[in-house]
Image (cartoon, helix red, strand yellow):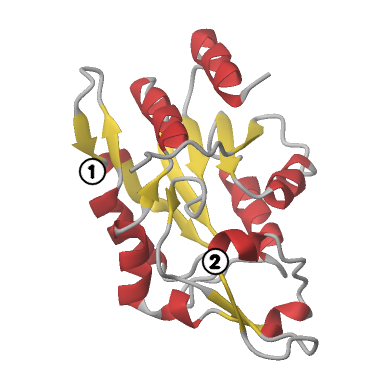
Amino acid sequence: MKLRDLLFEELLAEVKGENLLLLDVDDTLVITQNIYIYRKLPSDIKEVKLTPKQYAQEKITADSKEYYDYRDFRNPDTVANSIKTGIPIVSNLKIMDEYIKKGWKIGVLTARGMEQVVFEALRVWLKYKNLKGELKDIGDKMVRELVHAINDDERHYAGGTDFEKKANVIKSLSKKYDKIIFIDDDQKNLDIVKELGLKNVQVKKAEKWIIKT
């Protein structure tokens, strides 16, 4: 069954209580522009420049992470501009719209750092359609405390890898919400969350429909 089919089944079920739709950023909400991770493994002849999508395919462990340089993601202007100039992934934004209409909270869970910068850039860039079909700024539909950038330098997130950190955030949030749906493009993130065995947490693979120009 397709993601959107599952979505509408859940909407029809009219889930009660305090519910949270949790979204990744890169390759889930947006295809970001001009931001890279730099890899220099012992086997690399020279430094390799990776897009966030390419980075997600790397087999990274706590030991191998030292060979990756995240300097672009520590530059506030680069981080903000990568989102503000990004290409929206319409399919996932449409899903977000439907959950907002049903009164769900909207949160963000990303492997990025610079949490405050990410929050501010998303507040500028991210829009949703209201019940009248009007396109509106996300505004207070997305609040600061529900934006989690797990590699933030000022806030410590427990875990040895990005996958573990995301899982730990969801484990904590699961104690506060009746139901959580987590959408991410990286199957490894989804698998480790599934392994938590949390009955009120459901994971879904991000879709990939974008606006063609």
SS of the residue under disc 2: loop
Residue assigned mark 2: 51
| Amino acid type, mark 1 | Gly
Task: Tell me where residue 141 appears, x and y as whole percent.
Answer: 30, 38
Which residue corresponds to mark 1?
139
Spatial CA span between label 1 and label 2: 29 Å
Quadrant of res 115: bottom left
Quarter of the image for the C terminus: give it. Answer: top left
Q: Residue furthest top?
A: 12
Residue for point 65% across, 32% down: 202
Tell how many labels.
2
Other residues around mark 1 within 10 Å, as few (<14) / some (14–19) / many (≥20): few
- Identity of the residue drawn at 57% across and 33% down: 181
Q: Is residue 40 visible?
A: yes
- Tag 1 secondary structure: helix
Asked where in the image residue 88 lies, by quadrant, the reply is top left
> Residue 44, image x and y in percent?
74, 86
- 180 and 129: which one is in front? 129
Residue 111, can we see it?
Answer: no
Q: Is residue 150 above or below residue 172?
A: below
Residue type pointed to by label 2: Thr
N-term mark: 1 or 2: 2
Front-most of residues 35 and 128: 35
Q: Residues within 10 Å of mark 2 (few under 14, many from 20)?
A: some
Q: Is residue 102 above or below residue 168?
A: above
Q: Is 110 on the left-hand or right-hand side of 116?
A: right
Q: Position of residue 98 (x, y in %)?
A: 40, 23
- The reply to whether callout 1 and callout 2 are in contact (CB within 8 Å) is no
Residue at the image point whose x is 78% and y is 37% from the top: 197
